[in-house]
Image: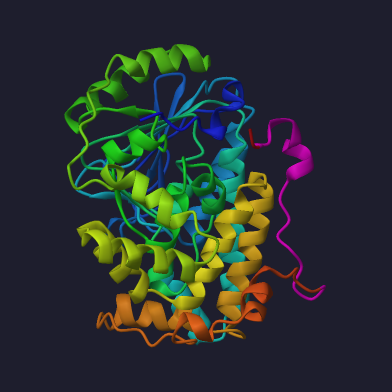
Amino acid sequence: MQRFKSSFLLRPSVRSRLFISQCNRYTTLSTIDDPVLVERKGSNTTTLLLNRPSVLNSLNYFTVSRLLQLYSSWEDDPVILFFLSDFRKGEGRAFCAGGDVINTYNMIKKGNIDECKELYQKIYSLAYVIGTYLKPQVALLNGITMGGGAAISIPGTFRIATEKTVFANPETLIGFHPDSGASFYLSNLPGYLGEYLALTGDKLSGAEMMSCGLATHYSLSERLPLVEEQLGKLMTDDPSVIGNFLAKFEDVVHLDQMSVFQRIEILNKCFSNETVEEIIDSLESETTKTADAWCISTLKRLREVSPLSLKVSLRSIREGRNQTLDQCIIREYRMTLQAFFGHITRDYCEGVRARMLDKERSPKWDPPSLEHVTNDMVDEYFSPLTSIEPDLELPVQQRKPFAIGKH
């Protein structure tokens, strides 16, 4: 399969080096209770370690604020040549499972919408800064990498997946939409894979990430300590040198027979349809003709998630194909506030309650079915915010020479 030519590589000379992981051992420049631990290795290596293992390193206000502060302070540091992000160290099994949605749910239920806005302004700004950073970045995706966790890794120059990598944008399962720049990188995937991942929330393995270009390299997890050790000795900010170095540690990718990439032709056929209803009709038609197990399981997924989220997410991916990273993030911020305000639907809180709190997995969506979702509802998600609720402000002008664009 032809690999996806990532638009994140348009300006490989303008990126950076970062170690991000969860590990309580490294306390060189911080205390053990800090949400982000900082370690210096040698004269040119800085390590950031996410330190909230009990919640799979999900992003909260303090974590994101600290990351933004560190990125800002190191961008012009001539000592730091590149960053390495290590997604899983110590006893944890995740780099970052995304935003702390339970905390967000609690804030909404208490009426603290301003706190929600501040948190997501920080998360989206961080995603933009990472996507336009001035130095090379290497991410070791060795564990759960979902939602916001993908947002602070996928924009990097190099992304190393392993046999332990689990990637997903599962937002529709809780009545939400892929955010934090997801409509940008999902819309850049080959064919209509982005639509499939956005609507179903399905997971990809490390091998599958490599096959579609979400990962640039694939190595077995047992090699990562050596990769990390050797990267720490590199004295270069040249992406081509770093890329050639990483290639020395690559392993052969083997796709499972049950992989979605074994169904890529039928996926493209079904998910290329213009509307969610037509996508479902196409899957039903294929199921009738072939009784294909993948079509059956995909239909089951689509029938379990929020009908409004399906339509909103499909439009978001389609719009993302013609937008820059900053445009996608600003639009996603509008959509996110609509979900939090609950004027159109309260599906977000209902989805979090049913799937993550009560865990009864039977959310009562409103609207309850696709035929009850009106065009006006979808349009309102994408409407510009009022003067009372201004759009998200990103440092586009300051970073414009390095901003990510489309091919």
In terms of image quadrants, where is residue 142?
top left
Q: Which residues are magenta?
A: 387-405
> In the figure, 172 relative to 145: above or below?
below
Q: Is residue 365 visible?
A: yes
Residue 321 x/y as whole percent:
61, 47
Q: Main secondary structure of the magenta part?
A: loop
Task: Residue at 52%, 25% (x, y): give it.
Answer: 136
In terms of image quadrants, where is residue 103?
bottom left
Residue 244 x/y as whole percent:
40, 13
In terms of image quadrants, where is residue 132?
top right
Residue 21 highlighted magenta (yes or no): no
Position of 300 with respect to 83 (left or right) is left
Q: Quadrant of the N terminus?
A: top left
Position of 152 with respect to 163 (left or right) is right
Residue 399 highlighted magenta (yes or no): yes
> In the figure, 233 relative to 127: above or below?
above
> In the figure, 65 relative to 244: above or below?
below
Residue with the most extreme front position: 289
Residue 78 x/y as whole percent:
60, 20
Residue 71 x/y as whole percent:
56, 39
Task: Residue at 35%, 84% (x, y): give it.
Answer: 363
Task: Residue at 28%, 60% (x, y): give it.
Answer: 295
Position of 195 with respect to 184 (left or right) is left
Q: How many marks?
A: 0
In this figure, which colouring scheme has been used for the structure? rainbow
Q: Quadrant of the C terminus?
A: top right
The residue nearer to you, when weighing 43 against 155, is 155
Position of 53 with respect to 174 (left or right) is left
The residue nearer to you, when weighing 221 against 218, is 218
Q: Is residue 102 visible?
A: no
